[in-house]
Amino acid sequence: MLKRGLIGAGGVGGGGSLPFAGPRGVFGGGNTSGNTIDYITIATTGNATDFGDLTVARSGLGATSDGSRGVFGGGNTSGSTIDYITIATTGDATDFGDLTLARYAPGATSDGSRGVFGGGANSGFSPVNTIDYITIATTGNASDFGDLTVARSGLGATSDGLRGVFGGGYTGSASNTIDYITIATTGNATDFGDLTVARSQLAATSDGLRGVFGGALGAANSVTNTIDYITIATTGDATDFGDLTLARYAPGATSDGSRGVFGGGANSGFSPVNTIDYITIATTGNASDFGDLTVARREVGAASGG
């Protein structure tokens, strides 16, 4: 019998859902042109280990997984690129295909089979409302899914295995919008509610029931440590969860179905950090130190596998 759980994945925002909770989290890309992929065992603590390299060095990418294969899509260079890894092994990524629209800083999530990439900024740096989808177990180009309720980039995405949610982002200013889709179908997103604080460049993940959003740029480019949460199967505004150990924006987030981790980002001085924090998603409270990424970086994509 399948357990409906979520393994979050995140880019500049992003999360992903999986049918089984797995122990390894991976963080890919970052900074202005990084190709680094490294990994951790989520149930433990400690520093990350080198995994391999992306096919194209880039930051501002979305990442998600089907529990076995992790995919990374979009970014600031070759922004239509999707590549993939087998999370249980180590090694370099392989070309998967292309997004329907080249873009930077989308949010990505999945239902354990289909991956979706929502929003981002196009080559003219304008936010878009595009949602694409792929079947993660195959390779090939993405297809059109529908549109977000508001065009925005730098948003966080996660799911409960059925419903995908997209929170925050940049519309010309920081947004508090949360909207949702049913991942197995296609169509436009629907309003869910609002984050506790309007912000962009945030990361999201879930335990299969509760979605959490952490880190970000707020009003006037203020860097926040805010974590808030929603119950994904319902609608309504987010609630305060606690704080990250370090205020930062553009981390990557993922989970093993119980513990959520936030890796990397940039601090209030806008310098990349290697910090990894963790929380227990089913509770509330402040994050604790987990360890360090192999390379300090921001605008990271994160996923995990079972």
Image: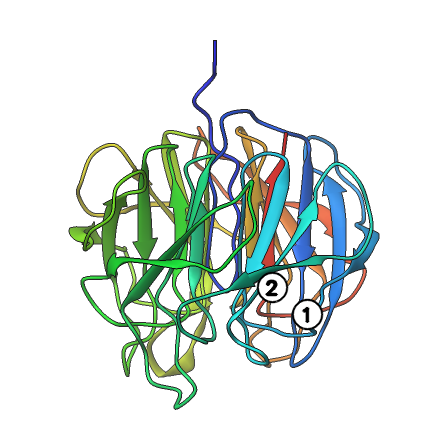
Please name the residue shown 49% across and 26% down the image: 19
Name the amino acid, label 2.
Val
Apparent side of residue 73 relative to residue 44 in the rendered image (left or right): left
Name the residue type under label 1: Arg
Residue 85 x %, y %: 69, 49
Q: Measuring from the top left, give residue 143's x and y in whole percent.
A: 37, 58
What residue sits right under mark 1 in the picture? 297
Between marks 2 and 1, how big is the CA–CA gap? 7 Å
How many labels, in total?
Answer: 2
Work out which quarter of the rendered image holds the C terminus and state it: top right
Residue 301 quadrant: bottom right
The residue depicted at 45 percent of the width and 54 percent of the height is: 108
Look at mark 2 in the image and give the residue it sits on.
Answer: 300
Q: Residue at x 63, y 48 (%)?
A: 277
Residue closer to the observer: 15 or 221:
15
Is residue 86 shown above or below 155?
above
